[in-house]
Image (cartoon, grey):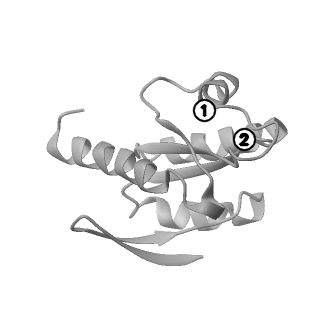
Amino acid sequence: DFGHLDYKGFHADLFGTIGQERFDPILEQLGGETLGVILVVDSTDPSSFPRAIEMLRKAKVYGLPIVIFANKQDLPGALPPEKVRELMKLPEDVPVVGTVATKKINIHEGVEELLKLIFKGVSGEG
């Protein structure tokens, strides 16, 4: 997937890929030119977390800021963001935002979290 974001004066190209291993070469190609990563996890399916952790590890190789979207918060059995953080053993400096992508709930908030991290890194505040 490919898209473009114009948000509060910030312009970015967005690339999306599903979490299957066969797409890993694409991640490696994009890594060198990427400013940040939004990793969307299915908060109703903890069995998918190990793959998400592997993708997170690959992104960290590039020193990229990362925000986790704990998606599907509207569905029964969805784990709250705090529980997703705990199960994925995420450090406190990785924001975890509860989202409902189909209804665009908290998507802007998550993007703002990522932009804060990107600008913090650019300004040297980190």
Name the residue carrying label 2: 43
Quadrant, the C terminus: top left
Task: Please state the horizontal and vertical placement of residue 12, each as a whole percent of the image.
Answer: 35, 70
Task: Please state the horizontal and vertical placement of residue 24, each as a whole percent of the image.
Answer: 67, 60
Reading the chain from its start, which is encountered first: label 2 or label 1? 2
Compared to 102, does 84 lie above or below? above
Left or right of residue 59: residue 13: left
Q: Quadrant of residue 54?
A: top right
Is label 2 in contact with label 1 (beta carbons under 8 Å)? yes
Residue lying furthest left: 123
| Residue pictured at 80% horizontal, 36% vertical | 46
Q: Quadrant of residue 113?
A: top left
Compared to 86, does 44 lie above or below? below
Left or right of residue 75: residue 124: left
Name the amino acid, label 1: Pro
Name the residue carrying label 1: 81
Secondary structure category for the residue under label 1: helix
Compared to 115, does 27 lie above or below? below
Q: Quadrant of residue 81?
A: top right
Which mark, by number, is residue 107? Answer: none
Q: CA distance from mark 2 to mark 1?
A: 8 Å
Task: Please state the horizontal and vertical placement of residue 10, each as a whole percent of the image.
Answer: 25, 66
